[in-house]
Image (cartoon, grey):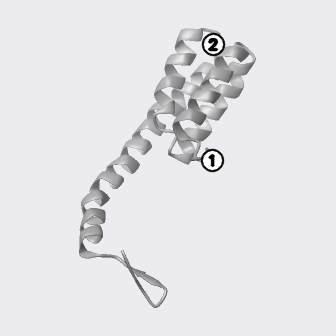
Amino acid sequence: MKRDSGKIIQSNESKSLLDDLRPLINQFGELSIQAYETYKPQVEHLIRSQTKDDNKIQHTLDHILDFCFDDQMLLLYKTLCRYYWKINPVATADYINYYREMWDSDKPE
C-alpha cells in the first residue's frame, strides 16, 4: 500500500488478493449460518432435557468452538458453557480457555 496525502492507496496486487478472498469469506458466512441452524436446536435440547452427559456436552462445545468467529455461534457457546458450569466447572473453565486461546485477540504480541 502506498500513502498519498495521508490516504492509503491499495495496490492492484492487494486489490486482486482481496477479490480472490471474497468468495472464501462469503463461504465462511454461509457455513456459520448452517452451523447455527444445526447447533442451536442441539444446545436447546441439551439444556431443556437437563443433560448431564459430559461427552455429549463436550462434543457439542468442541464443534461450536470452530465457529466462534460468528457472534451467534459465540452466544451459543457461552450459553452452553453457562449451563455446563453447574455440572462440571473444571471442564467448563477449560472450554473458556480454549476459546481464549483460539479467538481472543487481546493477547500482547
Name the residue nearer the viewer: 75 or 96: 96
Q: Position of residue 36 (x, y in %)?
A: 48, 38
Q: Position of residue 75 (x, y in %)?
A: 61, 40
Mark 2 is surrounded, within 10 Å at the Cα level, by few (under 14), some (14 to 19) or many (20 or more) other residues, namely some
Do the numbered discs 2 and 1 sit on residues whose CB atoms are within 8 Å? no
Q: Is residue 50 left or right of residue 63?
A: right
Classify mark 1: helix, strand or loop: loop
Whole-angstrom CA distance, mark 2 to mark 1, is 33 Å
Amino acid tagged 2: Thr
Residue that carries the numbered disc 1 in the rendered image: 106
Classify mark 2: helix, strand or loop: loop
Q: Position of residue 73 (x, y in %)?
A: 53, 39
* Residue furthest bottom in the image: 5
Residue that carries the numbered disc 2 in the rendered image: 51
Instruction: Please identify the quarter of the rendering in which residue 3 is found.
Output: bottom left
Q: Residue at x 35, y 54 (%)?
A: 25
